[in-house]
Image (spheres, grey):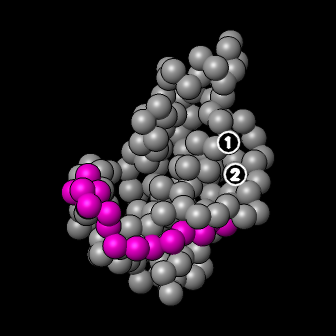
């Protein structure tokens, strides 16, 4: 996890394209410039970055299901709930499942746990559209780095 670069997912643990489900891991770094301001002397991962982590897991699910033909862009967050604080070193278990996909939009339900305890969850809405120029290759590189393109995550 590189918070300051919005590079949230470390590794895909499982992917079931047919069922529309993904599980991933993300380890919060021990140090990050984000913690200098949130909060000085009491570092916490901002809720917006936890939401982004759920959105990225959902996005990778949508990319895999569409075989990288369309890019998902987060358009809405509904029913978001935060149950606990997340600090440096936490290992986050991220999961997302597809609720709807069609007509250029997709909806997922996503959640984050640590040590089996729920931390947050949300319903996320995406607009799916052809890749903007120059974005396809970097997204494929990220997907390969986290194991989304491996046969094990098929």
Q: Position of residue 143 (x, y in %)?
A: 30, 56
Q: For residue 91: magenta?
A: no
From mark 1 to mark 2, how far is it between C-alphas?
A: 9 Å
Whether the residues at callouts 1 and 2 have beta carbons within 8 Å, the answer is yes
Rendered residue at 75%/48% (across/down): 82
Residue lying furthest top in this view?
41
Say which quarter of the image contains residue 144: bottom left
In magenta, the rendered stretch is: 123-138
* Nearer to me, 134 or 118: 134
Packing grade of label 1 (10 A; few <14, some 14-19, many >=20) is some
Screen quadrant of the C terminus = bottom left
Reading the image, the residue beneath label 1 is 47
Screen quadrant of the N terminus = top left
Packing grade of label 2 (10 A; few <14, some 14-19, many >=20) is many
Rendered residue at 53%/29% (across/down): 89
Reading the image, the residue beneath label 2 is 120
Say which quarter of the image contains residue 76: bottom right
Q: Position of residue 64 (x, y in %)?
A: 35, 71
Q: Is residue 17 visible?
A: yes
Q: Position of residue 83 (x, y in %)?
A: 77, 46
């Amino acid at each position: 996890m590189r918070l300051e670069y919005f590079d949230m997912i470390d590794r895909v643990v499982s992917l079931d394209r047919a069922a529309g489900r993904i599980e991933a891991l993300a380890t919060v770094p021990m140090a990050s410039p984000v913690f200098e301001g949130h909060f000085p002397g009491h570092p916490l991962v901002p809720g917006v970055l936890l939401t982004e982590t759920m959105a990225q897991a959902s996005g990778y699910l949508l990319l895999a299901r569409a075989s990288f033909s369309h890019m998902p862009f987060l358009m809405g967050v509904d029913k978001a709930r935060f149950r606990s604080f997340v600090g440096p070193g936490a290992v986050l278990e991220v999961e997302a499942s597809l609720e709807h996909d069609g007509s250029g939009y997709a909806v997922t339900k996503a959640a984050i746990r640590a040590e089996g305890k729920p931390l947050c969850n949300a319903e996320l809405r995406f607009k799916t559209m052809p890749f903007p120029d120059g974005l396809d290759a970097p997204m494929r590189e990220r997907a390969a780095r986290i194991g989304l393109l491996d046969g094990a995550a098929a």
